[in-house]
Image: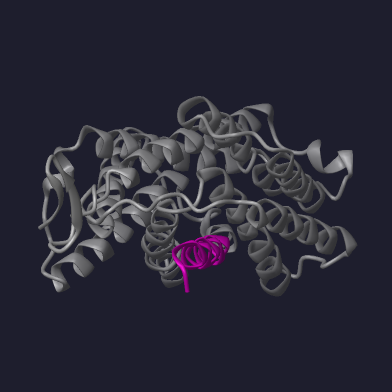
Amino acid sequence: MDSRRRDYVFVVLASVFWGTAFPGTKLIVGDVDPLFITMARLGIGALLGFAVLAAMHRLRWAFLREPWVWALGLVNSLAFNLQNVGLVYTTASKTALLVNVNIVFIAILMVLVYKEKVTAQRTAGVACGLFGVLVLATKLSPATLSGGDFLGDVLVFLAGVMWSFYVMGLKRMVDRGGDYIALVTMILATTAVFSAVPLALFPGRWPSDAVSWAGVAYLGIIPTFLPMFLYTLSLRTISPTVSSLLVLLEIVVATLLSVAMFGDVLDAFTLAGGALILVGTYVVARGEKELPEPGAGGLAPVPADTPLPGSDGITRR
């Protein structure tokens, strides 16, 4: 499997894991404070990362001296809290729609920052995917957009905007190369630290029974460290615009799980929305070129027997 196909598999797997977080959160958000969910989920994810690093004898703290890691932790914390608090005031359908609008901001930022070329194929694929989210989340009925509160809508929309900047910062760190497990772990750790601040200022309900604690544990272990690590790896060779479009698959997974767990109706709109997301993903991915992959420690070292041009001919080292 070549690098690009491998990283496509990684981001699809990340989408599947992230998709399970929506019904998982729905099970406990009524009984547990959303700020606590953010801190506990990211904290458990960080502890899992530390355990993996320790088992591999690669536990280093150098990333904590990186200002970008703390900046990403702050942005990630703000985005998670905005989404979780926004869910208290608005509907899940509008949350799915507004949060995933971040793909538009990511596409714009990629053009502005990385001078990424705007092609008709990419534009059509992104538009198709977003329309699929609209169909799946709203069923094309204005009534689904009438619930909730304007404040919740604004908070959830801002979460999507924050995540677009987070993805761009993460791409910058990935391009520098290095230990990606350590990078993800330290970002989760700084996110948990920042998430503890609002929880300390506005203490809320902690889990009070085994079901709530199990839900928090699940969110921290399954849809946090591993999918974030896989998504980070995908940025080595795949544009953030394409990765974010592939992440829309999480909505399909979440919808199917909601049908199984909560008895949500699997109707024609659900099937059509999921199909449009898949088609949009295929259209964009089909025309993408692989990005050059950074070396594990930044620039890849030159092998000892590589021929090099010199002032008096070709030499070897």
In the shown orientation, is residue 278 left or right of residue 141?
left
Check residue 7 for magenta coloring: yes
In the displayed structure, 119 sits above or below 275; it is: above
In the displayed structure, 300 sits above or below 14; it is: above
Q: Residue furthest top?
A: 112
Check residue 230 for magenta coloring: no
Residue 110 at x, y percent in the picture:
52, 33
Residue 32 at x, y percent in the picture:
46, 53
Q: How is the image coloured?
A: one colour
Mark yes or no: residue 77 visible: no
In the displayed structure, 111 sits above or below 192; it is: above
Which residue lies at the image location 14% right of the left edge and 68% below the top edge?
54
Which residue lies at the image location 88% right of the left edge and 38% below the top edge?
142
Which residue lies at the image location 10% right of the left edge and 69% below the top edge?
57
Mark yes or no: residue 33 visible: yes
What residue range appears in magenta? 1-20
Which residue lies at the image location 67% right of the left edge and 51% below the top edge?
284
In the shown orientation, is residue 288 left or right of residue 270?
left
Residue 211 at x, y percent in the picture:
47, 70
Query: Which one is nearer the viewer's eye here, 244 or 71?
Result: 244
Query: Which one is nearer the viewer's eye here, 7 or 208?
Result: 7
In the displayed structure, 221 sits above or below 163; it is: below
Q: Quadrant of the C terminus?
A: bottom left
Question: What secondary structure do most residues of the magenta stretch adopt?
Answer: helix
Residue 229 at x, y percent in the picture:
37, 59
Query: Which one is nearer the viewer's eye here, 220 or 168?
Result: 168
Q: Quadrant of residue 77?
A: top left
